[in-house]
Amino acid sequence: QVQLVESGGRLVQAGGSVRLSCAASRTIFSINAMGWYRQAPGKERELVARITSSGSTNYADSMKGRFTISRDNAGNTVYLQMNSLKPEDTAVYYCNAVIAVRGTTYQYWGQGTQVTVSS
């Protein structure tokens, strides 16, 4: 089991940058993958970016080149650096952790952090 706490969400103008943090209650190297998802009003939750325990990353197409997921190799934190923000990036951003145990996959979610991009 793991608890996730996001922080860093705020109001920002279009073109600005925000860095989100997700602190896990256990070392991130014991977690198979961690990721960021987002959910805008009236829309489904969507993947933003993901990083595996081996360091492999993948991004949603619309975020490539603007967003970067990284991790604190000394500890238990994953980051999402978001640059060149657009009003359509406005959403609640959720941290996600996937842990596989003996063939069963468990998913955990943080409480979310609001990012609002003004035009």
Image (cartoon, rainbow, N blue to C red):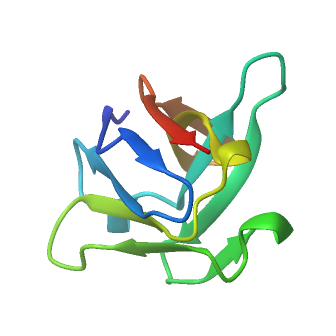
> Does residue 64 appear in the picture of this structure?
yes
Q: Please tell me which residue lies in front, 55 or 18.
A: 18
Q: Position of residue 77 (x, y in %)?
A: 26, 59
Report the side of 75 relative to 41 (left or right): left
Quadrant in which residue 33 is drawn: bottom right
Q: Residue furthest left?
A: 74
Residue 15 position (above or below residue 11): below
**To which quarter of the image does residue 70 belong?**
bottom left
- Location of the C terminus by quadrant is top right
Task: Please name the residue shown 68% across and 56% down the image.
Answer: 48
Q: In the picture shown, does residue 101 fall above or below 15?
A: above
Which residue is painted at 51% across and 70% down in the image? 83
Rendering coords of residue 57 (x, y %): 62, 78
Q: Is residue 5 above or below residue 63?
A: above
Q: Would residue 57 appear left or right of 69 to someone viewing this image?
A: right
Instruction: Where is residue 7? Give x, y as percent.
Output: 28, 40
Instruction: Tell which residue pokes out farthest to the front in this image.
Output: 119
Q: Nearer the viewer, residue 34 or 104?
A: 34
Judge whether residue 60 can be spotted in this image: no
User: Residue 79 location, x and y as percent?
Assistant: 37, 63
